[in-house]
Image: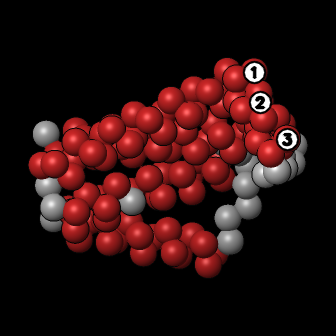
């Protein structure tokens, strides 16, 4: 069951982050002032993919809550960090972001950590 929860967390987190990045780049720069916050909420409501991203964050959050009820935090946090690896790959191939050698090496180190914790 723990790996099912990890998979749910990872995939929901990855989907949420990709959708949010895609939509917020399309929306342009947002302000964090009181008026900017209202515009941001309106942007979330108007953009279906952004709203779906927020819902995916909720799925990830509740999946993480279920995981830490069953497993130690020292397992849950590193195991759910597998999302960093998948997000980096998808950022390169889906969002066409440039991934430097240094960032790729850091992602590989995270992957090694996830494997060590999961073993």
Q: Which mark is residue 62?
A: none
Question: Horizontal and vertical percent for residue 44?
Answer: 70, 30
Determine whether, in the image, residue 70 is placed left or right of residue 36. left
For marks 2 and 3, give the CA distance.
12 Å
Helix, strand or loop for disc 1:
helix
| For marks 2 and 3 on the same chain, the one whose residue lies earlier in the sequence | 3
Residue at left 72%, top 32%?
41
Q: Are marks 2 and 3 in contact (CB under 8 Å)?
A: no
Q: Are marks 3 and 1 in contact (CB under 8 Å)?
A: no
Question: Horizontal and vertical percent for residue 81?
Answer: 39, 60
- Per the image, the residue denoted by label 1 is 46
- Per the image, the residue denoted by label 2 is 43
Residue at left 82%, top 50%?
33
For marks 2 and 1, give the CA distance.
5 Å
Question: Horizontal and vertical percent for residue 22?
Answer: 72, 39
Q: Are marks 2 and 1 in contact (CB under 8 Å)?
A: yes
In this rendering, the label closer to the viewer, 2 or 3: 3
Residue at left 48%, top 39%?
57
- Per the image, the residue denoted by label 3 is 35
Q: Nearer the viewer, residue 14 or 28?
A: 28
């Amino acid at each position: 069951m723990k790996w099912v929860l990890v998979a749910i967390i990872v995939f929901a987190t990855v989907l949420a982050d990709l959708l949010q990045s895609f939509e917020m780049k399309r929306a342009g720069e947002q302000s964090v002032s009181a008026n900017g916050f209202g515009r941001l909420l309106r942007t979330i409501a108007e953009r279906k993919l952004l709203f779906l991203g927020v819902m995916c964050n909720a799925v990830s959050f509740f999946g993480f809550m279920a995981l830490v009820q069953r497993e130690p935090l020292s397992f849950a946090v590193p195991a759910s960090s597998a999302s960093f690896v998948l997000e980096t790959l998808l950022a390169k191939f889906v969002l066409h972001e440039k991934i430097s050698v240094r960032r790729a090496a850091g992602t590989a180190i995270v992957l090694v950590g996830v494997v060590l914790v999961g073993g």
